Image: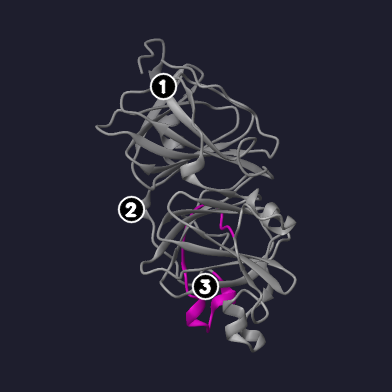
Amino acid sequence: MAMPAYRNSPDLAAEMRAQIGRHTDKSFDWDAFPGSRGFPELARAQMRYIGAGGSPKVDDPNTLRPGDFTLSLVHQPVGNYAACHSHEVVEHFLVLDGVLTVGWAFGDDIIEAKLGPLDMVLNQSERPHGFRNDGVGPVLMSISVGSGSPKPPVYACHPKDGDPERARRFGAAPGRTIPFDPDSDDPRQRGFARYIVRHAQRRPMWQAGLARLDYVGAAGAPPGGYRMEMIHLPRGIAVRGYARGVEDAYFVLDGAVTVGWEEGGETAERRLGRLDAIQNPPGRTRWFRNDGIADATFMLLSGGGAGEEVRFEPV
């Protein structure tokens, strides 16, 4: 992206570096969730990028300070599950690898849905939910919640309550587990379906040579606290600098993305690889392009449930 009127700034570059989370600089934390301690079947590991999510480890020095949302990865081994719980804010699970079983509680009934790679569920605030790995390989997923400092989870059914089999069913009474059916007339099923996004069913909106797939927003799950879309960035495509009044973050899922910042006529650029993230502050002019040898895909998280629309323009 040629910008001859600008000059590179060491100070801006240092600020930009401080807002990047490199996957290779991080490690998974197997003790991120106190409610799992002492229960091997609940074991899962968290890698924090922005904020602590559902973990109380808000003082992690390697984690970026959150605003309207958090961002982390969770690794769940085969056979393990997360006990049914709820949050006061929305929370999404985006599956990156494996097959995840998600359950929503409706009294003694649990509706369970299976999510594959790049499928997502946005869990409603106050809706008891759990997740389980019934597959043959580990699950890796991205998790975000709609607050920079969410309250601790409230458990609806936990193995410490004395019935581990029921806890594994997310609290379902015997025979009360219901498979997800988006074509059902059951209002519970229809409500759940509004919050599940299947990658194969996304209709891309092409703009400035790239494709935008809405996950949390007008054409996806109902937004609440933040918005999320998937950006497919073909090789050689670049967008002009844009600014917005809310923070946003890029989390690279495939390929490599070059990100630029501009302020006061000075610029800085960094390249992000797979599972790297950058947090862009409100008001900062930013841009991105694909200088790589293959197409790239990244998740774009934007603060503000109402959203602040941005239209990308080609260079």
Q: Earlier in the sequence, mark 1 or mark 3?
A: 3
SS category of the residue bearing label 2: helix
The span shown in magenta is 33-53
Q: Position of residue 146 (x, y in %)?
A: 65, 49
Quadrant in the rendering for residue 243: top right
Nearer the observer, 85 or 115: 115
- Packing grade of label 1 (10 A; few <14, some 14-19, many >=20) is some
Q: Is residue 212 above or below residue 104?
A: above
The dot on residue 218 is none
Q: Residue at x 43, y 39 (%)?
A: 298
Q: CA distance from mark 1 to mark 3?
A: 41 Å
> Where is residue 209, by image quadrant?
top left
**Residue at x-position 55% and y-position 22%:** 311
* Label 2, residues with CA under 10 Å away: few <14, some 14-19, many ≥20: few
Question: Of the residues under marks 3 and 2, which one precedes in the sequence?
Answer: 2
For this rendering, which residue is in front, 110 or 41?
110
Q: Quick check: can you spot residue 153?
A: no
Give the farthest residue toward the bottom. Answer: 162
User: Please, what is the three-letter code of the amino acid marked with disc 1?
Assistant: Gly
Q: Is residue 223 above or below residue 163?
A: above
Q: Could you tell me if residue 276 is visible in this image?
A: yes
In this figure, which residue is indicated by the disc labeled 2?
24
Q: Which residue is mark 3?
A: 81
What is the three-letter code of the residue carrying label 3?
A: Tyr
Considering depth in this image, is 107 or 74 the residue closer to the camera?
107
* Residue 138 picture quarter: bottom left
Tags 3 and 2 touching, CB below 8 Å: no
Instruction: Give the SS element for disc 1.
Output: loop
Residue 260 percent across, percent down from the top left: 42, 27
Q: Which mark is residue 209?
A: 1
Q: Residue furthest left?
A: 293
